[in-house]
Amino acid sequence: MSSLKNLKLNFPWSNESDIPPLLIPVLELCTFSLATLYVPFSLLDSWVLAQKQLKVLEIHHHSWDLRDRERQLSICEQLNTDSSYTPTLFLIANFGLLLDRIIAFPAFQTHGQWSAKDIADSIAWVNPLGISHFKLVIRTLSDESFVRNVLKSTAEHFTNLRSIEFLIYDPRIHTSPSSFSSLLQKFPLLDSIYFDYYGGLDKLTPAPYQQNRLGLAGIWATDCPMLRKIDFPDRVSAERDTGDMDWVVVSGANNG
């Protein structure tokens, strides 16, 4: 089995406590030379790091949310930044019987430019047009060049997105709202945007957007007419009134 290039592990366990205790030790003893690996999140461990020829790592997860966020993101960062190899890393989540949600990790791309094409190519069996929700882990929205490249690449390969969530490490926002708006224009069906933090930041961390939610919403929606909701990390959202279509602030929003 040492010449095995492609491996798909698909088990019904959603909780780590359900994994047979000997499974991961056995996998660590295997001398695969994998190029592609399809694995549930619960089986991510050091044995994956031994796959030095890995080009694509597709993780399946039973939830759209990263419930143990810091630990799970730490695993993904380690897998994506290990200098021994640079796999295309992404997580695909299911909603019922549909596989329509992807979590991508541009923040951890350290070798070359991140591209959504690699993800689209890897899930051709799903049909990228069926993907409607995208979560992007990005360190900061203030790096305009990086954000532009990420969104342009995403729009080129996932044209039917209805919602985008930005999981960010730095509370600073995109410094040019009109430029950000022109990028959102590339997603004609986009109706909601979510922002949340990772890296231990409290949801109430002071941030520039808090003073100008409605102003940002109005500018961002200029080129994105379907946009109806923008949810910020402190669970306060800007939403379009269904009557006069004006933007209003709503407290107690629930992140998607």
Image (cartoon, rainbow, N blue to C red):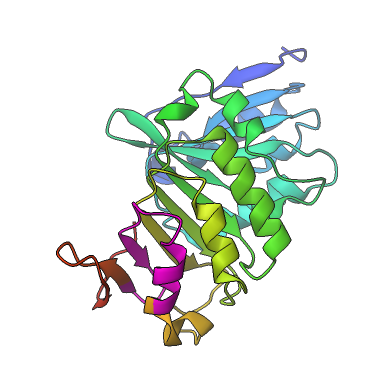
Q: Is 234 situated left or right of 78 in this image?
A: left
The residue under the point 45% across, 74% down is: 216
Taking the spot 54% from the left edge, 25% from the top edge, the residue there is: 123
- In the displayed structure, would residue 105 be above or below residue 221? above
Residue 135 x %, y %: 49, 50
Instruction: Name the residue rendered at 38%, 40% in the picture.
Output: 62
Q: Position of residue 173 (x, y in %)?
A: 57, 73
Quadrant showing the N terminus: top right
Q: Which image quadrant for residue 233? A: bottom left
Camera-nearest residue between 157 and 94: 157
Q: Which residues are magenta?
A: 215-237
Image location (x, y in percent) of residue 98: 33, 29
Q: In this picture, is 213 found above or below 119?
A: below
Q: x and y percent of residue 158 in the render? A: 51, 35
| 43 inside magenta stretch | no
Tell me if residue 222 is in the magenta stretch: yes
Q: Nearer the viewer, residue 222 or 109?
A: 222
Which residue lies at the image location 76% right of the left edge and 50% below the top edge? 81
Residue occupying the far right of the picture: 84
Total count of labels: 0
- From where the camera sits, is residue 22 visible? no
Which quadrant of the view contains residue 120? top right
Q: Is residue 124 visible?
A: yes
